[in-house]
Image (cartoon, rainbow, N blue to C red):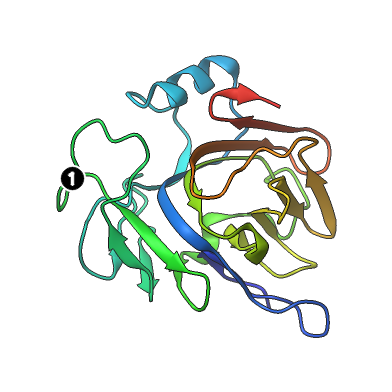
Amino acid sequence: DGNFSTIGRGIGQPGVWGARFYEGNIDEIIIFDRSLTESDLTLLLSGVEYPDDISGHYKFNAGSGDILFDHSGNQKHGVISGATWSEDVYVPPIPPAIGGNNSLIFDGENDYVEIDEGIFNLYYGEGDDCNYTISSKIKINDLEKEGIILGNGDNSTGLYIKVTSEGKINLHIGEENFYSSDLLIKENTWHHIIVSTDCYTTNYLWVDGVQH
């Protein structure tokens, strides 16, 4: 019925496309229940303080175990399936250490993290609840995989974010697709992407601190 949310996997739609698994590292995902203002964005990019209305905050810093902890206070912890802990991180302020600064690496075959199905309150891409900002730090090994970074639903329901084989950011909402006009993502390079949407009407995209 499409009621699931995952990191690193898209469930696929029978007869249209199969499950799409992400290949590379992910280091921190933050999900906000609203579009961010410019002042909010400044806080987010500082990495020191975060705006309010956080639905889920996954720091990827446990370094061991099969739980991806949600630090938002909402207890929407994820269950890691296959992905392994790595010390390869986004611009580490200190050398990586167990329980300090880590990421998860996904093999592009069957790795993912299952998170609370209520993390997105779309139902599905309709109504006043469809306002989100999603921040993620990623390093993709293989663009050809077109793996999904974070998603809820299949090809015709819900919301997901992926990077195309060309390196464009793709925001998918319901049956609509929105693409960045530029090729922004390179293989084997860390990027910080922020997508802010009110679903269908207005979408904003920042990559590595630059609005596109």
* Secondary structure of the residue carrying numbered label 1: loop
Residue 208, x across and y down, in percent: 54, 29
Q: Quadrant of residue 164?
A: bottom right
User: Residue 133's quadrant in the figure?
Assistant: top right
Q: Where is residue 149, by image quadrant? A: bottom right
Residue 67: horizontal and vertical position, in percent?
Answer: 29, 66
Q: Residue at x 56, y 49 (%)?
A: 187
The crowd level at tag 1 (other Cα within 10 Å; few <14, some 14-19, many 20+) is some
Q: Quadrant of the C terminus?
A: top right
Write down the residue under mark 1. Answer: 100
Q: Specify whether 140 is left or right of 163.
A: left
Residue 64 versus residue 183: which sits nearer the camera?
A: 183
Relative to residue 41, is residue 5 depicted above or below? below
Query: Residue extending furthest left?
Result: 98
Task: Tell me: 118 left or right of 99.
Answer: right
**Residue name at image x 79 percent, y 33 percent:** 202
